[in-house]
Image (cartoon, rainbow, N blue to C red):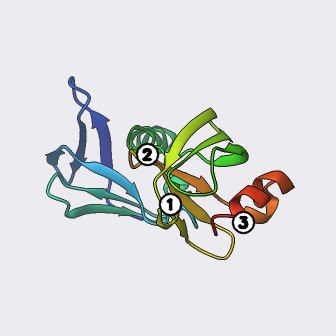
Amino acid sequence: MSAPFELSQDALGVWQLQLQGQVHQGVTVVRAFPIGAPDEAVSVLSAEGHELLWLEQPMQLPLAQQQAVQAALQAREFMPEIQRVDSVSSFTTPSTWSVQTNRGQAQFVLRGEEDIRRLSGNTLIVADEHGVQFLIRDLPTLDRHSRKLLDRFL
């Protein structure tokens, strides 16, 4: 288990970490394995990017610490998960995609096929023209229509 700590936001909403009697301003909380094991291993980094605290099992922390870690992660992360591909404007790029995500309906422009990256056999990351990354966690679980559209790009 790690040393006792307190993670909180200051009056301006900047995350700070109190650890061993010292307050570190402007810390960032990041997942070690955001796709493969999102509920395991979290690191708290200083404003300069140096690791201050490693949390092997953040879900086993006391409730107040667990909630602070989750809030800091949610404030930083934004990766909608594609659940269905409704349409693609063209099978050449750039193309406009209409998708259903875990955060609602979205539409984005795919600049090139290189913006679809395979992380594993079934997991893909699709980046739009603005750099927003969309996750396809398990390709075989998508409906037939979605897989058929994606096959044109893979």
Q: Nearer the viewer, residue 109 or 29?
A: 109
Q: Amino acid at mark 1?
A: Pro
Residue at disc 3, secondary structure: helix
Task: Between label 2 and label 3, give the one nearer the viewer.
Answer: 3
Q: Position of residue 74 (x, y in %)?
A: 45, 40
In the rendered structure, are the residues bearing label 2 and label 3 in contact, judged by CB atoms less than 8 Å apart? no
Q: Nearer the viewer, residue 24 or 63?
A: 24
The label on residue 125 is none
The residue indicated by pointer 3 is 151
In the rendered structure, are the residues bearing label 2 and label 1 in contact, judged by CB atoms less than 8 Å apart? yes
Most extreme residue toward the bottom is 121
Say few, some or many: other residues with alpha carbon within 10 Å of mark 3 (under 14 / 14 to 19 / 20 or more). few
In the rendered structure, are the residues bearing label 3 and label 1 in contact, judged by CB atoms less than 8 Å apart? no
Q: Amino acid at mark 3?
A: Asp
Q: Position of residue 103 (x, y in %)?
A: 61, 35
The residue indicated by pointer 1 is 34
How far apart are labels 2 and 3 at the CA level? Answer: 28 Å
Identify the mark nearer the N-term, 2 or 3.
2
